[in-house]
Image (cartoon, grey):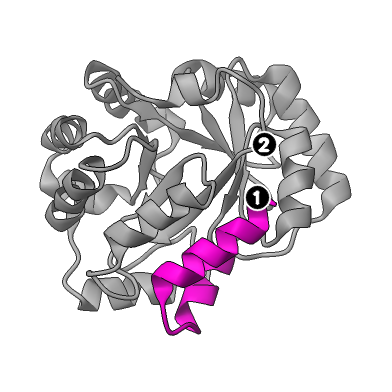
Amino acid sequence: MSRIPQLFSKRSEKVIPFLTAGYPNKLDTVNMVLSAEKSGAAMVELGMPFSDPLADGPIIQRASQVAIENGVNIKWILEIVIDIRMSSEIPLVLMGYINPIIKYGLEKFLQDCKKVGIDGLIIPDLPPEEAEKFVKLARTNHISPILLVAPNTSSERINLISKLAVDLIYCVAILGITGSENNMGNLKEYLARVEENSICPFIVGFGIKNREDVVKINKLAHGAVVGSAIINAIRGSGSSVDTVKNYIERLVK
């Protein structure tokens, strides 16, 4: 069963790091996830690299390109999840684009995700209108389909998306790409609207960088996703595992 409903059954501060699988190298990914958990991460989002990541900014795009050059693919990612599960029960979410998943086979992909212990899936370029098959197969395999809403999503549509997702939705904090800056005033109004119209918990990502951001977001939502800032820190470091550890410790304290 997905670990996500239990994780979000109680309202508490949650830090959710995003890590690109296979970046900066294939050897460090498992230990980065384990380090994130030990440092206080509530859940980890693992990015599946793709050559045309439309929702991602230049930092994550660059990380995806490096991971692809390192030979990362879906099969390898599922294999390292097995390694992670040997010593960790932290909720794991995969974020990936639809084309590689279709190429792999949607039904097979979800079955394999269940086998290795994936809890949730985010497919940012799959609109809700086309997500019915994905949602049904995800539920059959006890995986939480995590759908996206944005600041320009209507209240009615937020409600419909939350009913489709059931367990969790992902709120894009701004209109644009990952790593962009937030306007906190507009964000409060937007997330209040999500709170009012969603039947399920929601997490917030895009543009979250530091402890102050994490505190503000967790007062308005059920968790804060930190991606580009961590990937950028890894890029300039000598040890990706230590960088993840130190960065997340600063976010949770």
Instruction: Point out which mark residue 252 bears.
Output: 1
Element type at mark 1:
helix
Q: Which residues are magenta?
A: 229-253
Up-down relation of residue 51 to residue 89 (above or below): below
Q: Quadrant of residue 93?
A: top left
Where is residue 175? Give x, y as percent: 66, 53
Where is residue 146? Give x, y as percent: 44, 32
Up-down relation of residue 225 to residue 28 (above or below): above
Seen at 38% across and 29% down, the residue is 145
Seen at 23% across and 17% down, the residue is 140
Instruction: Point out which mark residue 51 bears.
Output: none
Pick the front one: 138 or 252: 252
Q: Is residue 212 left or right of residue 230?
A: right
Seen at 69% across and 41% down, the residue is 152
Is disc 1 surrounded by few (<14), some (14 to 19) or many (20+) residues within 10 Å?
A: some
In the picture of the structure, the residue carrying the numbered disc 2 is: 13
Is disc 2 surrounded by few (<14), some (14 to 19) or many (20+) residues within 10 Å?
A: some
Magenta region includes residue 231 = yes
Type of residue at label 2?
Glu
Type of residue at label 1?
Val
Q: Is residue 188 visible?
A: yes
Classified by dominant secondary structure, the portion drawn in magenta counts as helix
Residues at marks 2 and 1, CA–CA distance in whole angstroms: 8 Å
Magenta region includes residue 175 = no
Asked whether disc 2 touches disc 1, contact meaning CB atoms under 8 Å apart, the reply is yes
Where is residue 94? Give x, y as percent: 34, 45
Pick the front one: 165 or 213: 213
Which callout, 2 or 1, points at the residue further toward the start of the chain? Answer: 2
Seen at 66% across and 65% down, the residue is 180
Where is residue 232? Give x, y as percent: 53, 75
Q: Is residue 47 left or right of residue 155?
A: left
Q: Quadrant of residue 193?
A: top right
